Image (tube, rainbow, N blue to C red):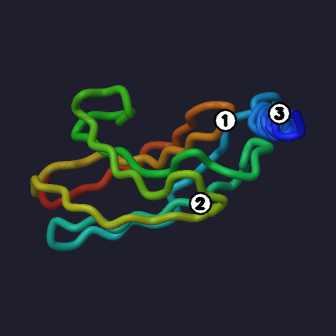
Amino acid sequence: MKQLKRLTTLCFCAAVLLAACTRYGTAVSTITSTEYENKQLKVSALVSDNGGCDFYMEQGFCYSLFSPPSLTDIYTTQVKVNGYSEVDSFSAVFTLPLTDTAYYVRAYVKNSAGLSYSPVVKIPTGNQ
C-alpha cells in the first residue's frame, strides 16, 4: 500500500511538471553564427525565450536546398544536437555535400508545448 501511494504521488508530480509547460508556449530560437569552409558548416543557435519551460525535449538544426527547411519535409536533413536538455545555446558542425549552390538552415527546439523554428538563414557555398 505504501509503495502504491509513493508511485501515485510520483506519477502525479511528473504529470504536473510535464503539463505545466503546455500552458505557456513554444521556445524561440535564433541562429547566432554560421561559418562555412571546405564543405563544413559550423552553426550556433540561442534560445532567447524558453516558452515558460525549464527544459527542452530536443534541439537541433535542419537544412535543405529548398526554403524553408522543416522536420516534416522529405528533402530536409536533420541534425539533432541535444535531447532532454536545459541548455539555452547549442551548435553543430556538419557537411554540406554540394558546392556552388545555396542551402537554407534553421534551428529547431521542441519543448512540451510543441516544436518551433528559428528564422531561415541562407548559406551560399560558392558561386551561384
Q: Nearer the viewer, residue 71 or 43?
A: 71
The quadrant in which residue 88 appears is: bottom right
Kind of element beneath mark 2: strand
Residue found at x 33% / y 44%: 78
Q: Earlier in the sequence, mark 2 or mark 1?
A: 2
Residue found at x 57% / y 40%: 110
Q: Which residue is mark 2?
A: 46
Q: Nearer the viewer, residue 27 or 99?
A: 27
Residue found at x 89% / y 39%: 2
Q: Which residue is mark 3?
A: 4
Residue 123 at least partly seen:
yes
Q: Earlier in the sequence, mark 3 or mark 1?
A: 3
Q: Earlier in the sequence, mark 3 or mark 2?
A: 3
Q: Which residue is mark 1?
A: 112
Q: Nearer the viewer, residue 122 or 51?
A: 51
Q: Nearer the viewer, mark 3 or mark 2?
A: 3
Kind of element beneath mark 3: helix
Decide: is 59 above or below 110.
below
Residue 20 at least partly seen:
no
Q: Position of residue 48 (x, y in %)?
A: 69, 55
Crowd rating for badge 2 (residues with CA inside 10 Å; few <14, some 14–19, many 20+): some
Q: Position of residue 53 (x, y in %)?
A: 76, 45
Left or right: where 38 falls relative to 53: left
Residue found at x 34% / y 51%: 79
Crowd rating for badge 1 (residues with CA inside 10 Å; few <14, some 14–19, many 20+): many
- Tell me the kind of residue under disc 1: Ser
Q: Position of residue 105 (x, y in %)?
A: 36, 48
Q: Are marks 2 and 1 in contact (CB under 8 Å)?
A: no
Kind of element beneath mark 1: loop
* Quadrant that contains the N terminus: top right
Q: Disc 3 versus disc 2: distance between alpha carbons?
A: 42 Å
Decide: is 5 above or below 37.
above
